[in-house]
Image: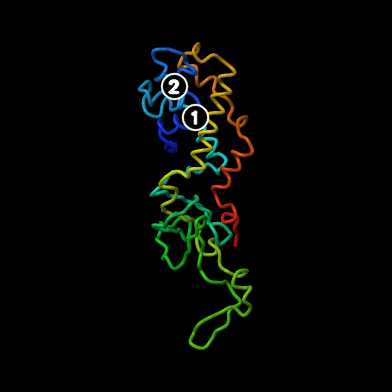
Amino acid sequence: MASEPYQSLERLRARIDFEPDDLFGESANAEKRFDRLLYGEAEVGDAPEGEGWRGLEAEARSIIENLSGDIPYNREPERVDEVRAPDTATIQLAYPVNSVATVEVKRSLRDDYEELPDYQYDVTDHHLIAEFGTRAGQTQQVGGNRRPVNELLGTTQRMNWRDRVRKVRVTYDRGYEEVPYQIQSAQADLVGRAIRKMRADQTFAAASPDEFAGVSPEFDDLLTDEIRRRIEDTTSLSGSARAI
């Protein structure tokens, strides 16, 4: 499913250094053509929702999400991820995780899903972490409590998802209520650079609206190291690099 726009047409227009008459001269429909270029044919009523030329906003959004593991920055209040249980104690979720509604598991592939009690997992901004205890290396203490003989065994011998289940289904709230400023800024810079490149390659006033999709530039050619860094810095990579 395609993500929602990261910023409104009005906000995007305000952030780029071009006006309709810069591209389409004094054409009677310059405003409409400019909006179509930025936001697609559906925005100006020339195509049904989700069809036709999507506009430079959508193309810039796609390349940003590609750099971010194909994860949108928009909020997803009821995202569902279903995975085979890994041979680690962590399952990576779509950053940032705001809250987890339910964790369901299959003990075998033939079983139905059953809800896992919340004391058997923990959650970070990036991960769902199994809290099943340890496989071995424990000794009985007074009062019935157990603790590892060697404290290091608490990590090296901890039970992982594969030890207890075969599949995991997580329903959770993730993403940003408002897309971070640095992402909106990077998107506007990509759109501006795309327009400059397209303007150098053709005369806009001579192009028909239906030709935009065929002449849009390759966004990989427009990514500067500075734009790429702003996109990558939005996600805490140190938090995602975790395997137990």
Sequence-wise, the earlier of marks 1 and 2 is 1
Res 203 → quadrant: top right
Q: Residues within 10 Å of mark 1 (few under 14, many from 20)?
A: some
Residue 244's place in the image compared with 65, above or below, is below
Residue in the image at 50% along x and 61% along y: 165
What amino acid does circle 1 point to?
Ile
Which is closer to the viewer, label 1 or label 2?
1
Residue in the image at 41% along x and 26% along y: 51
Q: Secondary structure at mark 1?
A: loop
Residue in the image at 52% along x and 55% along y: 126
Look at the image and tell me in which quarter the C terminus lies.
bottom right
Image location of residue 16, percent across then percent down: 49, 29
Residue in the image at 58% along x and 30% along y: 219
- Between 68 and 229, which is closer to the camera in this rendering? 229
Q: Secondary structure at mark 2?
A: helix
Q: Residues within 10 Å of mark 2 (few under 14, many from 20)?
A: many
Image location of residue 154, percent across then percent down: 59, 72
Look at the image and tell me in which quarter the N terminus lies.
top left
Image location of residue 224, percent across then percent down: 63, 35
Image location of residue 150, percent across then percent down: 63, 78
What amino acid does circle 2 point to?
Phe
Identify residue for label 1: 16
The reply to whether callout 1 and callout 2 are in contact (CB within 8 Å) is no
Total labels: the figure holds: 2
Q: CA distance from mark 1 to mark 2?
A: 12 Å
Q: Residue furthest top?
A: 206
Identify residue for label 2: 34
